[in-house]
Image (cartoon, helix red, strand yellow):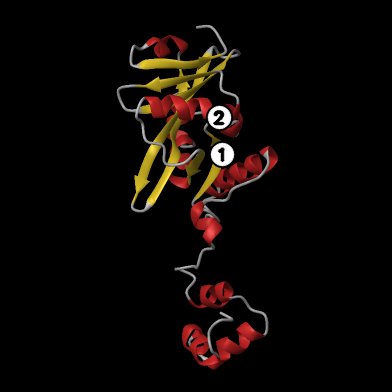
Amino acid sequence: MSRFSEYVQRQILGSRQKLAEFKSGASIESIFNRLRPQYPIRRYVDVLGRIAKSKEGVALNFEQMLQEIRQKKRLSVDKIVVGKLSDEIVEFLRNMNVPIHTKEIYINHKGLSHIARDSKRRRGAGLDEEDILRIPEILENPSAIFFEKSKQKFNLLYCDDKSKKCIKLVINTKFQKKKDKITLVTTAGYINTSDMKNPDFELIFRDWKF
């Protein structure tokens, strides 16, 4: 705002009163959001997704989004970063000519809401709360990674030895919605290890036997 004249600032804000509020220390975001709460201004970082710099920060952001969905609150962000593609995976996908929009792996509120649905859990396909919260950990240290050739996506697969089931995270490296192009967790659920012997699944990495 500082690069604009006082006249232009007043035109942007709409009145002398709002300009006075701004000069007194009120942010443009708070001024507009008070008048139009149904169409809030969102910060650039919130639109792109909150990017945490530590494992603890990623876990905290993820848990916050899950709680907002559970409590049906207005979401503070639309998507967050929950992991990152390794250099080995990036090289593999490029060799397969699969587009990669971002090395960062995101999850958005729609995908997390789908994963956390009670109806899905009642069918036995949905993840328990504890396993949902482990998604960032699974992305960082997967037990196996497969490339799903039929859909040009790749799956990150984690084996839970206690239940003899796997947690399968489906990652779309070429997700696009309007101008938003990202690598996205699209869904997750339990799957039997025997199902991963499907010929459409090409093994990239494995740290367990099945």
Q: Is the C-beta separation of discs 1 and 2 under 8 Å?
A: yes
State the residue position of label 1: 82
Q: Residue at x 62, y 85 (%)?
A: 21
Q: Residue at x 49, y 88 (%)?
A: 8
Whether residue 74 is visible here, answered yes or no, is no
The answer to whether residue 86 is left or right of residue 92 is right
The answer to whether residue 25 is left or right of residue 18 is right
Q: Amino acid at mark 1?
A: Val
Query: Distance of mark 1 from mark 2, alpha carbons?
Result: 8 Å
Coordinates of residue 173 in the picture (x, y in percent): 41, 35
State the residue position of label 2: 139
Q: Earlier in the sequence, mark 1 or mark 2?
A: 1
Other-residue count near label 1 (Cα within 10 Å), few / some / many at <14 / 14–19 / ≥20: many
> Closest to the observer: 158 or 154?
154
Query: Residue 59: which quarter of the image?
Result: top right
Whether residue 22 is visible here, answered yes or no, is yes
